[in-house]
Amino acid sequence: MERSQIPEANILDSFRAQIANATAQRTPLRIRGGGSKDWYGQSLEGELLDTRPYAGIVEYDPAELVITARCGTPLAEIEQKLAEHNQMLPFEPPHFTHFGGGTATLGGCVAAGLAGPRRQFAGAIRDFVLGVTLLDGKGQVLNFGGRVIKNVAGYDVARLMAGSLGTLGLILEVSIKTLPVPVAENTLKFECSASDAVRKINEWAGRPLPISATAWRGGVMAIRLAGAEAAIKSARSTLGGETVDAVEATRFWEALREQTDPYFADIPEGCGLWRVAVPPVAEPASLPGQRLMEWGCAQRWWITDADAQRVRQDARQAGGHATLFRGGDKQVGVFTPLAPPVLDIHRRLKQAFDPAHIFNRGRLYPDF
């Protein structure tokens, strides 16, 4: 049956029945959209709760720069609708469909909390989530935030859903702020060492330059400029570097966002792809393996066979933390262990939203 033919109430009743049964049996439910990010996180447990039947754009007024859609709506459908009005999702969410999953959905996009090259300069997905409708572990429909930009009532629970990996409940509907597509873009590249890249990018970040993305790998640094033609022309004159062909540049940034870039293509056996978040001014680490830096040098990727303790110790000494993004041995823990006070907050949130602990059990942490 096509999604448009399924009454909304029937879908919600089906969700509630599945949640009630899982609660009664104390068995886990695995909330899943297209499954494009099934590989991300600690583990997959429980009976599948498929969000895709609950799909469709609920409201979109280009003049308000806000789109509201249901959780099962394909991300590509939303991006296409925005493109028709010369707008975009500013955080450039990855689809990751080439990893073997299905079509990326809006609910999965928010739950994963992942962003692309523009994140450092535009903001994370949580910065653009205005409102969320959630189905909790008791089968209650809860509304947080709203569908307008000027919304300040109550606790900012809507943003809490970004990156929660479905552990707090089933996201039914999301309202997201959009932005106009930049008038123009231009990519420059420079040959430099990792240390020089850190120095230059931080120097340029402190100046009024229209930088929208940065990346360094293999001795080459790429800088994407976005905005008015005059601003880009002035920035090109200031920065120098070699201009990259527009088609080649588009392919490069898309490959970086979707991790189809050759850097991510093959993770050798015994190695893991680590995502390390550190202050952008931190000096490049001396860990063995292949490196790539983006987000103004605040996000650093390492493909290495170094043990988890060493990677995390290095990240901690630099003032950050490390996540085992893909590959490697998940028994070491995908996400950095939480400090006891923070873990206590997580547990209390879980208890409030999901008392029976049925939603995506073990996805963030083995005992959560």
Image (spheres, rainbow, N blue to C red):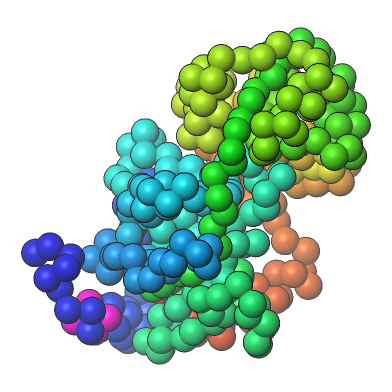
- Locate residue 238, reporting x and y percent: 85, 22
When the figure is inspected, residue 45 is found, relative to residue 59, above or below; the finding is above
Magenta stretch contains residue 13: yes
Q: Residue at x 31, y 47 (%)?
A: 103
Given residues 220 and 273, the one toward you in this image is: 220
Residue located 33% across and 60% down the image: 73
**Where 164 falls versus 216 (above or below)?**
below
Q: Nearer the viewer, residue 249 or 232?
A: 232
Residue 266 in the image, given as x and y percentages of width and height? 49, 21
Q: Main secondary structure of the magenta part?
A: helix
- Say how many tags the image has: 0
Quarter containing the C terminus: bottom right
Q: Residue furthest left?
A: 1
Q: Quadrant of residue 196?
A: top right
For the N terminus, the image quarter is bottom left
Q: Observer-nearest residue: 114 or 246? A: 246
Q: Position of residue 323 (x, y in %)?
A: 65, 44
The vertical placement of 164 against 257, above or below, is below
Instruction: Judge whether residue 26 can be spotted in this image.
Output: yes
Q: Is residue 124 magenta?
A: no
Compared with 183, 72 (above or below) is below
Q: Residue at x 27, y 69 (%)?
A: 54
Residue 210, by quadrant, is: top right
Q: Which residues are magenta?
A: 10-14
Relative side of 244 to 66, left or right: right
